[in-house]
């Protein structure tokens, strides 16, 4: 398992190296894209990035859960959750990385 975490600064650095924008402009661009994606998700829209995957917000209904240790019933309140479904291309790419 890789110990590396991809951060906003890593993305900004990649934009800087690939596109040639200044580091500040690259960081602003990455921030703008992430803000636009998160704003769309907050509004309840689906975000589909071709060859990567789809982000969607699901509304989960209230239900009764159980504490596994005591068996006590606990109400679980309705909530919105973020889901991600990777594209087939992304699934294949990740799976091919497992072969090493």
Image (cartoon, rainbow, N blue to C red):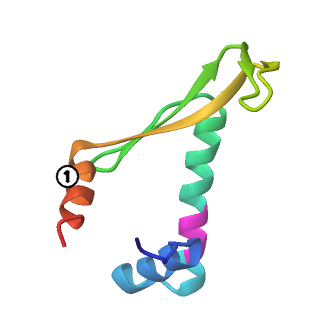
Q: Quadrant of the N terminus?
A: bottom left
Of residue 67 and residue 27, the one placed in the foreground of this image is 67
The secondary element bearing badge 1 is classed as: helix
The residue lying toward the viewer, choosing from 5 and 55, is 5
Going 73% across and 21% down the picture, which residue do you hit? 66
Most extreme residue toward the front is 70
Residue 71 vs 52, above or below: the answer is above
The answer to which quarter of the image holds residue 59 is: top right
Q: Which residues are magenta?
A: 27-31
Query: Which residue is at a point 60% across and 28% down the rendered structure image?
Result: 44
Left or right: where does residue 59 sit relative to residue 65? Answer: left
Q: Is residue 17 above or below residue 6?
A: below
Q: Quadrant of the C terminus?
A: bottom left
Query: Going by the image, does 2 lie left or right of 75?
Result: left
Q: Residues within 10 Å of mark 1 (few under 14, many from 20)?
A: few
Residue 47 is a magenta residue: no
Tell me if 39 is positioned left or right of 56 in this view.
Answer: right
Marker count (numbered): 1
Point out residue 84 in the picture as x, y percentages from the top left corner.
Answer: 46, 40
What residue is rendered at 34% in x and 81% in y?
18
The answer to which quarter of the image holds residue 95 is: bottom left
Q: In terms of depth relative to the viewer, which is nearer, 90 or 27?
A: 90
Question: Taking 71 as reference, is 9 above or below it?
Answer: below
Secondary structure mostly taken by the magenta-highlighted segment of the chain: helix
Q: Nearer the viewer, residue 78 or 41?
A: 78
| Residue 26 on image: x %, y % | 52, 77
Q: Position of residue 21 (x, y in %)?
A: 46, 82
Q: Which residue is drawn at the image coordinates 67% and 28% (left, top)?
A: 80
Give the residue at mark 1: 92
**Left or right: residue 1 compared with residue 35:** left
Q: Is residue 29 magenta?
A: yes
């Amino acid at each position: 398992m890789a110990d590396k975490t991809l951060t906003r600064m890593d993305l900004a650095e990649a934009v800087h190296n690939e596109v040639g924008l200044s580091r500040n402009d690259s960081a602003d661009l990455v921030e703008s894209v992430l803000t636009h994606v998160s704003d769309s998700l907050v509004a309840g829209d689906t975000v589909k990035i071709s060859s990567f995957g789809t982000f969607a917000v699901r509304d989960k209904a209230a239900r009764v859960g159980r504490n596994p240790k005591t068996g006590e019933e606990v109400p679980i309140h309705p909530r919105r959750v973020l889901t991600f479904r990777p594209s087939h291309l992304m699934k294949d790419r990740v799976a091919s990385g497992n072969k090493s």
